[in-house]
């Protein structure tokens, strides 16, 4: 049996197991272990141990549980609720102002958590019912929450970029900085679309009644305190890292400690909040570590059978594709897989193939990490089985149907596609900040 056939059988077996509902790490790990045993015999038993030691020797892995902990303690302590109240008052006088404020809330939540699920949960439970009560169009605001929550995997500290850095062996600090400007650019494009759409169709996002937002300036300024804590946490966490004062791991520890102190100062650090935060942090961290471990085993088998070189030969030699044509095919494959899989599964499945190929084609792997993340955001909201679509269906109020959710994402997917094209055509959008910061170190 040729190595190309073995590679195809590995992919087919893994996808079949995933479609049966098996957990991602179990499906990938089982296929990797079974293939290794068939190819290498008893000697393959050492592969998972080697992968485990490689994983636990990777120092930046310490950032993963710390950032997850930081996001959950801010969420569980109710600081996100205070933030939305601030956006509610300050943006209520603008047509579509609550939708704009929701995007602002999502940016802050992304900077505190790094996971799209947290943004989706907060947006669907806090922002969405409030906007519906205020007469906002349910289709538009459903798209706002879905699009805004997707920023969590691009704006630092993105957990997905941490995973990409681990698998692709790229500096996580550079990846974070590379995702910052494209993430803020995408958020700005969302806001521009909302403002323009609500000016053309004012009934989609009516201005709040004056009684709801007419309060003394002193009271409005007091509401700004809700935004000071997340800003300070983000500054101490990311700002000190950018200035070279702290390392990546130290900045994650600063973020986690600052979030705990913030909850304590606001007298919300109860035993229940702490227990819930620790429980969720442990669950998410262990899940990601098992996935990374399975990915390392999978990559080792793939590298051993020469699948990377076979794919390279197929695209470049046999099909005679240009580097950009290969890159576009790779992005389209993410969108196709995103209809059925989440971001971590996609990354684990194709990273062993695509990352070495990106280097051979002459592209920057840090820049490609941003492209991968933006494409995942698009894939999340691609019907019929986009990950965010069903997550929103599970969390949204009863009056929002699955058809409403499908209709809501079209304009936002187009905006995200525009952002992807801009980053592809102008790579410095993603690369100038990490180049500037690391050139000063």
Image: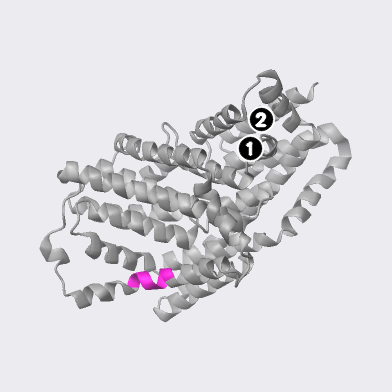
Highlighted range, magenta: 226-231
Q: What's the residue at 70%, 30% (across, down)?
A: 10
Image coordinates for residue 9, horizontal then vertical, percent: 70, 26
Side of 441 where 188 appears, left or right:
left
Closer-to-camera residue (20/122): 122
Image coordinates for residue 247, horizontal then vertical, percent: 63, 68
Image coordinates for residue 307, horizontal then vertical, percent: 74, 30
Q: What's the residue at 31%, 50% (across, down)?
A: 191
Q: Is residue 126 visible?
A: yes
Do tag 2 and tag 1 residues touch (Cβ < 8 Å)?
Answer: yes
Image coordinates for residue 334, horizontal then vertical, percent: 54, 34
Residue under label 2: 11
Residue under label 1: 349
Q: Is residue 204 visible?
A: no
Side of 324 where 304 appears, left or right:
right
Instruction: State whether residue 231 is above or below residue 296.
Output: below
Closer-to-camera residue (234/364): 364
* Inter-mark Cα distance, 2 to 1: 8 Å
The answer to which quarter of the image holds residue 45 is top right
The number of numbered discs placed on residues in the rendered structure image is 2
The quarter of the image holding the C terminus is: bottom right
């Amino acid at each position: 049996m040729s190595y190309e056939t073995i590679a195809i059988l590995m992919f087919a077996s893994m996808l079949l197991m995933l479609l049966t509902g098996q957990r991602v790490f179990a499906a990938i790990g089982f296929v990797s272990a079974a293939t290794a045993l068939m190819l290498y015999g008893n000697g393959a038993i050492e592969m998972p141990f080697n992968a485990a030691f490689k994983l636990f020797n990777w120092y930046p892995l310490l950032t993963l549980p710390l950032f997850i902990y930081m996001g959950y303690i801010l969420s569980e302590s109710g600081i996100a609720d205070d933030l939305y109240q601030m956006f509610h008052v300050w943006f209520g006088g603008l047509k579509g102002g609550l939708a704009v404020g929701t995007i602002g809330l999502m940016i802050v939540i992304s900077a505190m958590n790094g996971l799209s699920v947290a943004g989706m949960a907060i947006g669907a439970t806090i922002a969405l019912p409030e906007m519906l009560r205020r007469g906002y169009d349910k289709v538009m605001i459903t798209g706002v929450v879905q699009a805004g929550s997707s920023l969590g995997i691009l704006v630092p500290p993105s957990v997905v970029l941490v995973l990409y850095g681990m698998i692709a062996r790229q500096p996580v600090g550079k990846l974070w900085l590379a995702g910052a400007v494209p993430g803020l650019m995408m958020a700005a494009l969302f806001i521009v679309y909302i403002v323009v759409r609500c000016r053309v169709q004012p009934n989609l996002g009516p201005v709040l009644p004056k009684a709801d937002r007419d309060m003394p300036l002193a009271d409005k300024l007091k509401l700004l305190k809700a935004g000071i804590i997340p800003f300070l946490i983000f500054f101490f966490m990311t700002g000190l890292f950018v200035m070279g004062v702290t390392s990546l791991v130290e900045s994650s520890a600063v973020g986690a400690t600052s979030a705990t102190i913030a909850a304590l100062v606001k007298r919300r650090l109860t035993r229940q909040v702490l227990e819930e935060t620790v429980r969720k942090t442990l669950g998410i961290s262990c899940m990601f570590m098992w996935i990374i471990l399975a990915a390392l085993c999978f990559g080792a088998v793939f590298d051993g059978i020469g699948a990377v070189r076979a794919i390279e030969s197929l695209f470049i030699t046999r099909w005679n594709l240009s580097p950009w044509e290969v890159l576009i095919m790779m992005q389209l494959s993410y969108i196709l897989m995103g209809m059925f899989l989440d971001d971590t599964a996609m990354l684990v499945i194709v990273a062993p193939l695509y990352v070495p190929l990106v280097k051979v084609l002459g592209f920057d792997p840090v820049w490609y990490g941003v492209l991968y993340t933006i494409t995942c955001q698009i894939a999340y909201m691609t019907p019929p089985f986009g990950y965010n679509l069903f997550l929103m269906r599970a969390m949204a109020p009863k009056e929002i149907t699955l058809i409403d959710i499908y209709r809501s994402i079209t304009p936002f997917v187009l905006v995200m596609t525009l952002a992807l094209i801009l980053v592809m055509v102008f790579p410095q959008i993603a690369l100038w900040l990490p180049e500037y910061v690391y050139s000063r170190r």
